[in-house]
Image (cartoon, rainbow, N blue to C red):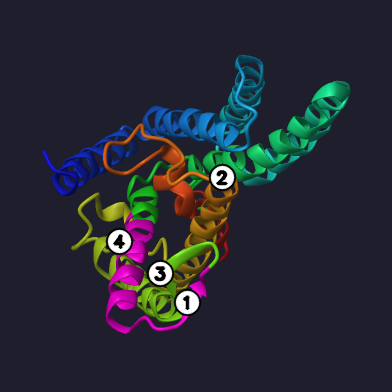
Amino acid sequence: MNNFWTRVVSGIGMIALVIFLILQEQWGITTLAIIIGIGCHFEWLKLKGKLTTLNLTISLFYFFIILFFRQINNSDLHNLWKSIAIFLPILLGFNYTKKENKIFNINLIVNHLYISIPLLLFTLTPYTKSYFNHYNAMLPIMLMILVWSSDSWAYVAGKLFGKHKLAPKISPGKTWEGLIGGTILSGLTGYLIVQYLLEPNGGFIGSDNYHIFNPLKGIILGISISIFGTMGDLFESSLKRKAGVKDSGNILPGHGGMLDRFDAFLFAAVVFTIVSRIP
């Protein structure tokens, strides 16, 4: 099987697994966050040159603690921020007692800001501000569709019109035309999702999606995810460039590592959770 078909088959399998787990409600989306988190934490430490059994254990321990706080507080974002505010001083105090490992301590903190917190927020996406106790699978699916489509739209726009490099030293293939075209088309995609997939007669998840978002919020979400997703992609590309590697890993055949596939998603999950809860 050549590389193209390897990418296609593994890509379809990954999308199917993501949607299947999201549809299993809370345990499913938490399992998905754990799978992504373990892979991303491992690859982050590898890229930073700090991958040891001890460092990975500490990193995953705090990741699971963060998810534990999320389970305690259910979907209340305000209480989650209070839990994180208590958790961070403990993290700082624990790590800075190990002076011989000080560089890693800073990396560990950034690690959780970059990976753990976005994944925690991802587990909140099925809940809106008005429906804390109602799991709506279409909302995380909407997030995933916007992330995937944004990348595709930017690629197409860049191929057709791309002339001006966006960040040539970090990601030579990205152009300003691709970013602008991808952002506009992602806004349109967000509008279409809200207009047709979240309506009672058009939604394939169910009629209880009606009036959760208005079309304008769909446009804002699409635009925001395109911009922040690109930032996430560039951030991960800069990590790989500093590490001198092409891919963050090889766990996904034809697609590289977890960070390669979910770099845009980590930034997008934060902005989706925040914007979706704005009245």
Q: Amino acid at mark 2?
A: Pro
Label 3 sits on a secondary structure element that is helix
Label 2 sits on a secondary structure element that is helix
Q: Is residue 97 left or right of residue 119?
A: right
Decide whether the magenta segment is chiefly helix, strand or loop: helix
Q: Amino acid at mark 3?
A: Gly
Label 1 sits on a secondary structure element that is strand
The percent coordinates of residue 91 (x first, y second) are 78, 28
Point out the frontmost of discs 4 and 2.
2
Q: Which residue is mark 2?
A: 118
Determine the CA span between mark 4 and mark 2. 24 Å
Neighbour tally class for label 2: few under 14, some 14-19, many 20 plus, Cα within 10 Å: many
Q: Quadrant of residue 267?
A: bottom right
Query: Magenta residues?
Result: 145-168
Point out the frontmost of discs 1 and 3.
1
N-term-proximal mark, 4 vs 2: 2
Q: Which residue is mark 4?
A: 198
Q: Are marks 4 and 3 in contact (CB under 8 Å)?
A: yes
Q: Is residue 125 magenta?
A: no
Q: Is residue 150 magenta?
A: yes
- Which labelled disc corresponds to residue 234? none
Point out the frontmost of discs 3 and 2.
2
Determine the CA span between mark 1 and mark 4. 36 Å
N-term-proximal mark, 2 vs 1: 2
Neighbour tally class for label 4: few under 14, some 14-19, many 20 plus, Cα within 10 Å: many
Q: Amino acid at mark 4?
A: Leu
Neighbour tally class for label 1: few under 14, some 14-19, many 20 plus, Cα within 10 Å: some
Q: Which residue is mark 1?
A: 165
Q: Are marks 2 and 1 in contact (CB under 8 Å)?
A: no
Neighbour tally class for label 3: few under 14, some 14-19, many 20 plus, Cα within 10 Å: many
